[in-house]
Image: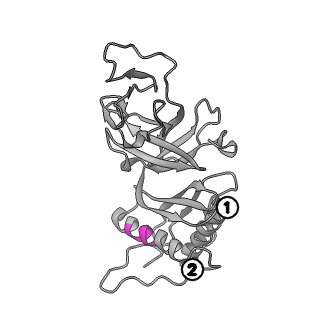
Amino acid sequence: MTEKNLGGWSPVGMSNALSVRGVLRVVVDGMDLAVWRGDDGKTRAWENRCPHRGMRLSYGFVRGNRLTCLYHGWGYDGDGACVSIPAHPTLTPPKTIKVARYACVEAAGLVWVAAEGANDPLRAPDGRWLPAQTIDLDLTLADARAAVAAAAVEAQAADSAYAGSGIETSDDSPLVTFVDARSGSRVLCALQAVADDRTALHVLVDASAGDVKAMQRAYAEWGRRIRRNQGRASLPAFVPPAGTVAPTSYLA
């Protein structure tokens, strides 16, 4: 991790995007990571580099609770230790052969990563959250946070009962949460710093919403609007596609 990310947690994707025996490549602050899930259901985040020849481990495959490199088949257990080298089947791999690991947990419908041994507790909102959309933005983390907060204010402005209420964000948090104007349900936006000028936006909705599928559709489009209009001072009014029925939300 880069220095600015050593003490905190970063969202790196939706929990539902990582299946059992699945491996994902994610980038946080320029750091290339392999995030995978074993048969035990646990998520793990490692440096995306096999200690042998530097092959990306995200190209590998999972069997049980072991991640195997695709290049020469070196296998690593859940703790990152090399446990098998196919070219030398009788050899017990030295304990020094180990993949660099990062702390990895799941909360609020997201996978989170921090430096291994990070002491800061993860502060994620309570409740059950369902995915709406993941969007890549060509914006810095600060600019992406500002764009999301501005779009949240605009969303609430559709109903004076919620205008300016319930929006929670801060400069040291990757989260922006707010209340949907028409339904009164919460929306969660998680920001992942990919590089200095690129940020991933993960949008989730509260599972307790009256019409969850409508909320998911609405905020998937809301996220796409932010991407289409990134960098502008304000967003143009939303117009539902022809032939669609607007959901019960601020888009209605």
Q: As drawn, is 217 to the left or to the right of 231?
A: left
Which residue position holds label 2?
Answer: 235
Looking at the rendered structure, the secondary structure element under dot 2 is loop
Determine the CA span between mark 1 and mark 2.
18 Å
Q: Is residue 124 above or below residue 38?
A: below
Q: Nearer the viewer, mark 1 or mark 2?
A: 1
Which residue position holds label 1?
Answer: 142
Residue 70 in percent (x, y) is at 34, 37
- Kind of residue indicated by mark 1: Ala
Q: Which residue occupies the foreground of this view, 245 or 191?
A: 191
Residue 227 in percent (x, y) is at 51, 71
Q: Is residue 37 above or below residue 221?
A: above
Indicate the quadrant where residue 156 lies: bottom right
Residue 101 in percent (x, y) is at 52, 32
Query: Is any atom of residue 125 visible in this view?
Result: no
Identified at 36% across, 39% down, the residue is 60
Asked if the stretch drawn in magenta spans residue 46, the answer is: no
Q: Which residue occupies the foreground of this view, 224 or 47?
A: 47
Quick one: which residue is furthest to the bottom in this view? 242
The quarter of the image holding the C terminus is: bottom left
Indicate the quadrant where residue 92 lies: top left
Identified at 35% across, 65% down, the residue is 211
What is the basis of the colouring in this image?
one colour
Q: Is residue 230 above or below residue 141?
A: below
Asked if the stretch drawn in magenta spans residue 220, the answer is: yes
- Kind of residue indicated by mark 2: Leu
Identified at 69% across, 42% down, the residue is 3
Looking at the rendered structure, the secondary structure element under dot 1 is helix
Q: Which residues are magenta?
A: 217-221
Query: Is any atom of residue 199 visible in this view?
Result: yes
Q: Main secondary structure of the magenta part?
A: helix
